[in-house]
């Protein structure tokens, strides 16, 4: 019984769709790291500079002062080290921007795949022959005379 369950599980895992899904999840995780780095390391510093040298990762609200060191705190890491309870607005903003970039990339990828599939279907659907209106035999699209009944075609 255990061997049959193991074989069934092995067959399930070795299916192409499960392997494809696994590869997609791994690539998605790597892509998310790239997007997060792009947002926090490339996009947010110039945006913060344009908004008056604001470091978005240090946008936070202190809900409760730390027991170790009372506020105000210069940075989020200083507040966290002091044991303060904070709402991290800058980190949330970075996460929203990262999500929007990932969603836009996925949207563009799906649009491109759909366009390619549509072109493939159109190429497959384009007929290579037509019916002769007189004898109903299949003839090439470019034919001007039916090879079967020799009728002139319009």
Image: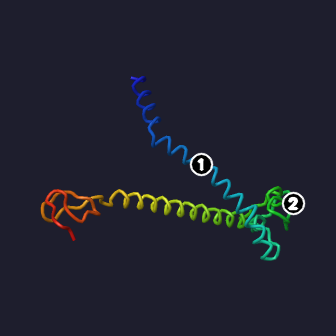
Helix, strand or loop at mark 1: helix
Using the image as rendered, state which of residue 77 and residue 46 is in the foreground.
Answer: 46
Q: In the shown orientation, is residue 106 left or right of residue 8? A: right
Crowd around label 2: few <14 · some 14–19 · many ≥20 (10 Å): some
Please tell me which of labels 2 and 1 falls first in the chain.
Answer: 1
Using the image as rendered, state which of residue 81 and residue 24 is in the foreground.
Answer: 24
Q: Quadrant of the C terminus?
A: bottom left
Say which residue label 1 marks.
Answer: 27
- Verify CB contact (< 8 Å) between mark 2 and mark 1: no
Q: In the shown orientation, is residue 35 left or right of residue 48? A: left
Using the image as rendered, state which of residue 80 and residue 136 is in the foreground.
Answer: 136
Q: In the shown orientation, is residue 7 left or right of residue 72? A: left
Mark pair 2, 1: CA separation: 43 Å
The quadrant where residue 118 appears: bottom left
Helix, strand or loop at mark 2: loop
Q: Look at 21% across and 63% down and name the residue there.
A: 145
Say which residue label 2 marks.
Answer: 69
């Amino acid at each position: 019984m255990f061997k049959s369950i193991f074989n069934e599980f092995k067959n399930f895992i070795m299916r192409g769709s499960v392997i494809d899904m696994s590869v997609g999840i791994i690539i998605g995780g790597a892509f998310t790291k790239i997007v997060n780095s792009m947002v926090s390391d490339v996009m947010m510093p110039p945006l913060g500079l344009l908004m008056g040298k604001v470091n978005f990762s240090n946008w936070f609200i202190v809900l409760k002062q730390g027991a170790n060191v009372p506020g105000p705190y210069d940075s989020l890491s200083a507040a966290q080290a002091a044991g303060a309870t904070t709402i991290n607005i800058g980190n949330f903003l970075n996460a929203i921007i990262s999500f929007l970039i990932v969603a836009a990339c996925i949207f563009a990828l799906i649009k491109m795949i759909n366009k390619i599939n549509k072109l493939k279907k159109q190429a497959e659907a384009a007929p290579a022959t037509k019916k002769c209106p007189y004898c109903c035999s299949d003839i090439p699209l470019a034919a001007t005379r039916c090879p079967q009944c020799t009728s002139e075609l319009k």
